[in-house]
Every structure is written in C-alpha cells, then in structure tokens.
Amino acid sequence: MTIVRAGRVVRAVVVRGLAALGLVVLIVAVTPVAHWGVAALETDAPLVRADAIAILGGGIRNDGVLGDQTLRRLVYGLRLFRQGYAPVVILTGGNPTDPSLPESEAMARVASELGLSGPAFIVETRAARTVDQARVIADIARARGFKSVILVTSPTHVHRAYQAMRKAGVRVIPGPADRRTGDAPTRWLTLNPASVMLRLADAAALTYEYAALTLYWWRGWI
C-alpha cells in the first residue's frame, strides 16, 4: 500500500469515526437515552433515621473552594442533619492532587460558617477515592458503634458508593443529593439549550460512572 493510499484510508476512517460520533452526540442531545441510563443508577429507597450521615466529597477547586458536586452533597447532608435524620455527620474526602487542601476540611469550614460544627462532626481528610471513603466510613462506624449510615452523594455516584460501603461492611441507607425534578429530560426531540446541555452532561456522567463501576467490579471493590 502506498503512502498516499494509506493516507486516504486513514482519512476515511477518521471521517467515518467523526460522523459516527456526531450521530451519537445528536441522538443523546435530542432523546432521553442518557436520562434512562442515569436513572438506572439512582435509587428510590426510602430515607429513614440512622446513626450517622456520611457526606462524600466530590471535588474541590485549587483555591480551596468546594466544587459544585461537593457543595450540593454538603447542603443536602446538612439539611438531613438539621431535620434529625442522624445525630452525627461524617465528612470524608481527601485531595489526590493537593493533599494540603482536603475536601472534607473545606466542607467542615462551610458547615461551621453556617453554624454547624462541634463533636457531632467527624472530619476524615485522607480518603481520596470512593473505595477508600467506604473503608474509612466502615472503620469509623465500627469504632463508634454505628449500626447504620445514610450515604449522601450525587445521584449517579450513589450506586457505586453504596456497593463499596456494603462491601466494607456498612449498613447503608442511600441518600442521593440533588434529585432532578421535571420531565424535560424524558421528552423526545427536544432542542432547547437547557435540555440539550443536561442530556450531554448526563451522558458524560454516565460514561464515567459505568467505566468506574467496571473497574471497581474488576478490582473486587464492589
């Protein structure tokens, strides 16, 4: 095969690949397929009282400001605490890129600024992965005699975190934060910008989460 012919073959493959990718993006943007995939990861288990609420960190900026996911989880978990769902809050989350800025300490700082601090708050600063957070929570639960823990994390993340915590020996009550309401993501052929962006975000989260679930299954973490 000559170099010219090889170049044409490569270009043809690239063009077809981009066309296929464009078609997939279009399908995701105007149909509810990504929403269905995300819904499969969520849980409708009833929320009941427990011995503790575990809030998992989900990202922090380089300046120490909580990322969007972490903030949503924190606000929801603190609401559950204020509503009396558990007498103790476990804040867990290190920082794999900068250990000097743990997510959990930033969460504790925000909670304190809202008037919520003291012995009811346990701050764990080293666990930077979901599996490590699950194991740390299990250790804390055993040490403190907690029989049940409400797990607060993002809806797409709750299934993996739930399975990891069960594997670690914790009785888990799922408490997914930021449940979506409304029917916009379930409508077909919707082209308004808000729905398109939401569906593309769902698709990105879905791709990441199913890849992570595969890894966790392969490593025996769930």
Image (cartoon, rainbow, N blue to C red):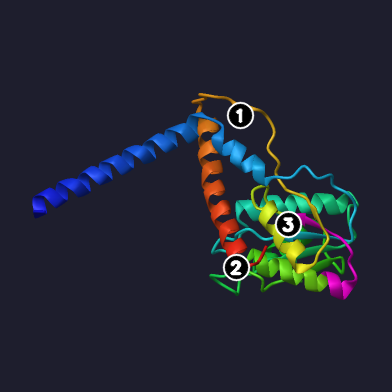
- Between disc 3 and disc 2, the foreground one is 2
Q: CA distance from mark 2 to mark 1?
A: 34 Å
Which residue position is annotated with label 2?
A: 219
Which residue position is annotated with label 1?
A: 186
Say what amino acid the circle numbered 2 marks: Arg
Q: What residue do we see at 87% from left, 52% from top?
A: 82
Q: Is residue 26 left or right of residue 208?
A: left
Could you classify mark 1 by the number of other residues whose Cα lies within 10 Å: few (under 14), some (14-19), or many (20 or more)? some
Q: Is residue 203 left or right of residue 152?
A: left
Could you classify mark 2 by the number of other residues whose Cα lies within 10 Å: few (under 14), some (14-19), or many (20 or more)? few
Say what amino acid the circle numbered 1 marks: Thr
Could you classify mark 3 by the number of other residues whose Cα lies within 10 Å: few (under 14), some (14-19), or many (20 or more)? many
Is residue 150 rendered magenta in the image?
Answer: yes
Classify 140 as above or below 25: below
Q: CA distance from mark 1 to mark 3?
A: 26 Å
The circle on residue 162 is 3
Reading the chain from its start, which is encountered first: label 3 or label 2? 3
* Magenta extent: 141-152
Q: CA distance from mark 3 to mark 2?
A: 16 Å
